[in-house]
Image (cartoon, rainbow, N blue to C red):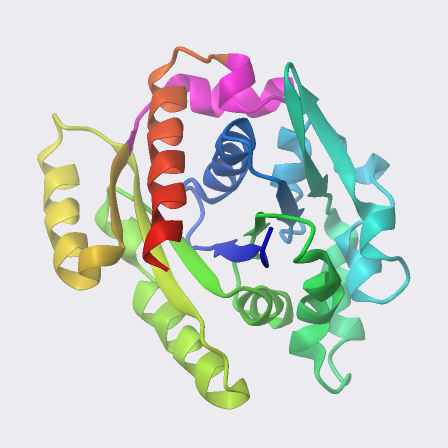
Amino acid sequence: MGAARVIAVLNQKGGTGKTTTAVNLGAGLSRQGKKVLLIDMDPLGGLTSSMGLDPWQAKPTIYEVIMGRAGLAEATLKHEYKGGSYDFIPANLNLEGAELELANVQGRELQLRKSISKAKGKYDYIILDAAPRLSILGMNGLYAASEIFLPVDSQFLGMNGLLLLLDSVKMANEELGHDLKVTGVILTKFSERLGLSKEIEAIIEERFKRALFRTRIRNNVSLAEAPSWGQDIFEYRPTSNGAKDYMALTHEVIAQEGRA
């Protein structure tokens, strides 16, 4: 096993399927035999809840890891399903405190990067459910990752903030000599019947070209229901369109390895 691919799933707009993508892509990769670590970097703890864990019952969390109060292994939990498992690190609103506590710390944007550096040899994929704001937490996600996946819902509003995000990626690369790339754009909440979805598809294809995955994540109620049961889509409804789409996406992500 080589060094893990560290992927930040990020969009500053809510409701684009960011957490849904982080969870179900990780779950799909695990089912393809990959060793996966999911890290919740959102203080709202959406990924943590999706794992069936009350964020307030989680301790230590990624907050303690970033602040140097716990090691990565101490905060790592296992999500088990029939036939396998994948690891995750929870988060809760305590993570908001890191913004203030790190404000005057030199190298504050590198805390997460330093924390996960030793874990890269243990996993094939480390997937960050990144903080939605490009604050100290958001920049920690950018500096820790080597790739960004952008989930974009098929609405014009879902595209808002993408240019700002790309500017932040450029800043991360220039300021610290980082080599962060947008290697995947994922169209979510897609409907072939809606002309708007097709319009967005055409715009994204023009803007991101090869980074746009062929798979479209269709509107599917099972994707919205699964987190309330603490399950990924493959546990909750393995025959649903949501499961089919995220497995198709999983195969595309794995296929990228041969082109790296």
Left or right of 253 on screen, residue 2: right
Along the line of sight, the residue nearer the viewer: 155 or 53: 53
> Residue 177, relative to residue 210: is it above or below?
below
178 displayed left or right of 187:
right
Residue 12 in view, yes or no: no
- Depicted 38 relative to depicted 116: above or below: above
> In x, y percent, where is residue 14?
45, 47
Residues drawn in magenta: 217-236
What is the total number of numbered labels drawn onto the structure image? 0
Q: Hey, which quadrant is residue 130 in on the image? A: bottom right
The image shows residue 255, relative to residue 69, as above or below, that is above
> In the image, is residue 227 part of the stretch drawn in magenta?
yes
Relative depth, front residue between 195 and 115: 115
On the rendered image, what quadrant is the C terminus found in? bottom left
Q: Where is residue 5 shown, x and y percent of the image?
A: 52, 56
Most foreground residue, 84 or 135: 84
Most extreme residue toward the front is 1
Q: What residue is rendered at 80% in x and 54% in y?
A: 72
**Considering depth in this image, is 141 or 249 the residue closer to the camera?**
249
Question: Can you name the residue that lies furthest to the right here?
Answer: 69
Residue 33 position by quadrant: top right
Seen at 17% across and 58% down, the residue is: 209
Magenta region includes residue 222? yes
Q: Is residue 196 visible?
A: yes
Taken as a whole, is the magenta stretch helix, strand or loop? helix
Q: Position of residue 118 (x, y in %)?
A: 74, 62
